[in-house]
């Protein structure tokens, strides 16, 4: 046994979404720069999944590092009840300037799951405060909103949630309005909305990430939102994955004419530097909590609510988001993905190819899905051996890169995806 990180880790750590008995040893990463991760054994990996979708400007970005470092020696943390600080005030001001114009208040928490919990609790208490019996949530089939109990409840029931099934609250699931399924989905929602007890509709706008980068159009989402609006149902847009450029615009909601009542953010918020969650809401939601009566307040908070260092990281990230280069990179990556997707069309092994902005997903043709599980691991290993980090979701492999990824690096990622295709095509 050498004294590598990889070996020491195996004696003490428990990793997320990992079967610890059979998983290969984790790769020890010594440092990161731009889109590249440098391992302790000298190998390099292109981070084509932005380290679980969080990293948008590249690793160890000097501008974010400088801002965080400055904040650390100014104010590392302060209680956020009864107190405030410049990074939180400035971040909220700047976020509200960028978000749909009806968003008027910012509530901080720690991650994407808590941002969703907060939105759900705000929506439910909005009705409770008015003495209205609206308690049911509508979510999309296949959705993923996080791993806490509330977030799990509004997510697809799956092997992930099975052990906790009896503790999850009941949700009405709506078929995703993927191309060809728009009408069915709309009609299903119409039927659901004849009920009087629907509190809110929560969804991942345009792209359902964990479901396998399942995509649907802004036009149909606008229609669903309009229907909710007409029926007095609150609209919660979970932009935890789609926020900050992923879909080719700053926010997925920038493609829409309708505006959500509540929005959730996390992954790209700090540029992938620190854990921070944000839930924003309209003035109407906020106002329903205002009263002389203290029991109508929103009773939710975390020890590290609005941590100044995390807010500082977000401010630095926003500097980069508001730079011209940001939109140029989104266009460059989107254009490049489109060309690659085109080149795959009709090739053996390809079942479908989907793209929204900087997210490209390839669905492989696989006969027996049971056989596929080992193939998924083979594909993952094949990519790593070629110096690219890609994490297939079942038979779907996607690229979702930091926006600083160079054209040369992107070409290498595509090359590995093409190798994957050849492996799949040769297996059947
Ligand atoms: C990742 C994700 C979450 C959960 O965020 P965490 O920070 O992992 O808790 C919620 N919603 C969506 C759409 C996500 O992609």
Image (cartoon, rainbow, N blue to C red):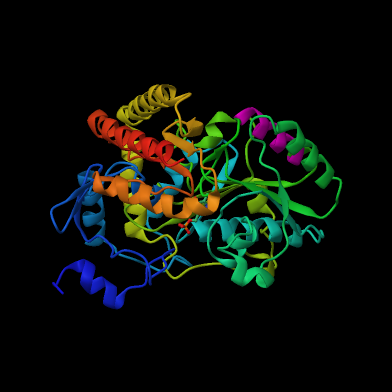
Instruction: Tell me: 215 left or right of 349.
Output: right
x%, y% of residue 39?
18, 55
- Whether residue 162 appears in this view of the structure is yes
x%, y% of residue 319?
32, 39
Instruction: Tell me: 406 left or right of 52.
Output: left
Instruction: Tell me: 210 left or right of 290.
Output: left
Image quarter for residue 186?
top right
Query: In this picture, is 211 found above or below 216?
Result: below
Instruction: Tell me: 317 left or right of 207.
Output: left
The residue that appears at 51% across and 38% down in the rendered structure is: 365
Q: Quadrant of the N terminus?
A: bottom left
Image quarter for residue 408?
top left
Query: In this picture, is 234 found above or below 347?
Result: below
Of all residues shown, which one is farthest toward the bottom?
11
The residue that appears at 61% across and 56% down in the rendered structure is: 155
- Whether residue 89 appears in this view of the structure is no
Image quarter for residue 359?
top left
The one nearer the camera, 404 or 317, is: 404
x%, y% of residue 57?
30, 41
The one nearer the camera, 189 or 399, is: 399
x%, y% of residue 273?
31, 53
Residue 262 lies in the magenta stretch? no
Q: Which residues are magenta?
A: 218-228
């Amino acid at each position: 046994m050498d004294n590598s990180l990889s070996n020491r880790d195996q004696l003490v750590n428990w990793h997320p979404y990992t079967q610890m008995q059979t998983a290969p040893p984790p790769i020890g990463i010594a440092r990161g720069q731009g889109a590249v991760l440098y391992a302790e054994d000298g190998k390099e990996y292109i981070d084509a999944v932005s380290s679980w979708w969080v990293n948008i400007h590249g690793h160890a970005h000097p501008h974010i590092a400088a801002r965080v470092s400055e904040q650390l020696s100014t104010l590392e943390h302060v209680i956020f009840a009864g107190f405030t600080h410049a990074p939180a005030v400035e971040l909220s001001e700047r976020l509200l300037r960028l978000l749909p114009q009806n968003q008027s208040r910012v509530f901080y928490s720690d991650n994407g799951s808590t941002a969703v919990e907060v939105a759900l609790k705000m929506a439910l208490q909005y009705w409770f405060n008015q003495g209205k019996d609206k308690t049911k949530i509508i979510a999309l089939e296949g959705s993923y909103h996080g791993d806490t109990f509330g977030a799990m409840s509004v997510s697809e029931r799956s092997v992930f949630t099975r052990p906790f099934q009896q503790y999850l609250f009941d949700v009405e699931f709506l078929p995703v309005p993927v191309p060809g399924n728009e009408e069915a989905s709309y009609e299903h929602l119409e039927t659901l909305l004849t009920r009087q007890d629907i509190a809110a509709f929560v969804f991942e706008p345009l792209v359902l990430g964990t479901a396998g980068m399942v995509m649907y159009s802004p036009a149909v989402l606008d229609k669903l939102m309009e229907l909710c609006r007409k029926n007095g149902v609150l609209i919660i847009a979970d932009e935890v994955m789609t926020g900050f450029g992923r879909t080719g615009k700053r926010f997925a909601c920038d493609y829409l004419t309708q505006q959500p009542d509540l929005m959730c953010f996390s992954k790209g918020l700090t540029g992938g530097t620190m854990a921070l969650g944000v839930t924003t809401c309209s003035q109407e939601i906020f106002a329903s909590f205002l009263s002389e009566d203290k029991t109508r307040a929103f009773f939710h908070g975390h020890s590290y609510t609005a941590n100044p260092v995390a807010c500082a990281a977000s401010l630095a990230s926003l500097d980069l988001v508001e730079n011209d280069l940001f939109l140029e990179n989104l266009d460059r990556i989107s254009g490049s993905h489109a060309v690659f997707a085109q080149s795959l069309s009709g090739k053996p092994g390809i079942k479908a190819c989907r793209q929204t902005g900087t997210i490209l997903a390839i669905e492989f043709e696989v006969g027996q899905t049971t056989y596929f599980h080992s193939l998924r691991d083979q594909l993952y290993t094949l990519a790593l051996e070629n110096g690219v980090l890609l994490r297939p979701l079942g038979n779907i492999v996607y690229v979702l890169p930091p926006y600083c990824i160079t054209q040369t690096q992107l070409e290498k990622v595509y090359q590995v995806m093409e190798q994957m295709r050849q492996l799949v095509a040769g297996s059947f």
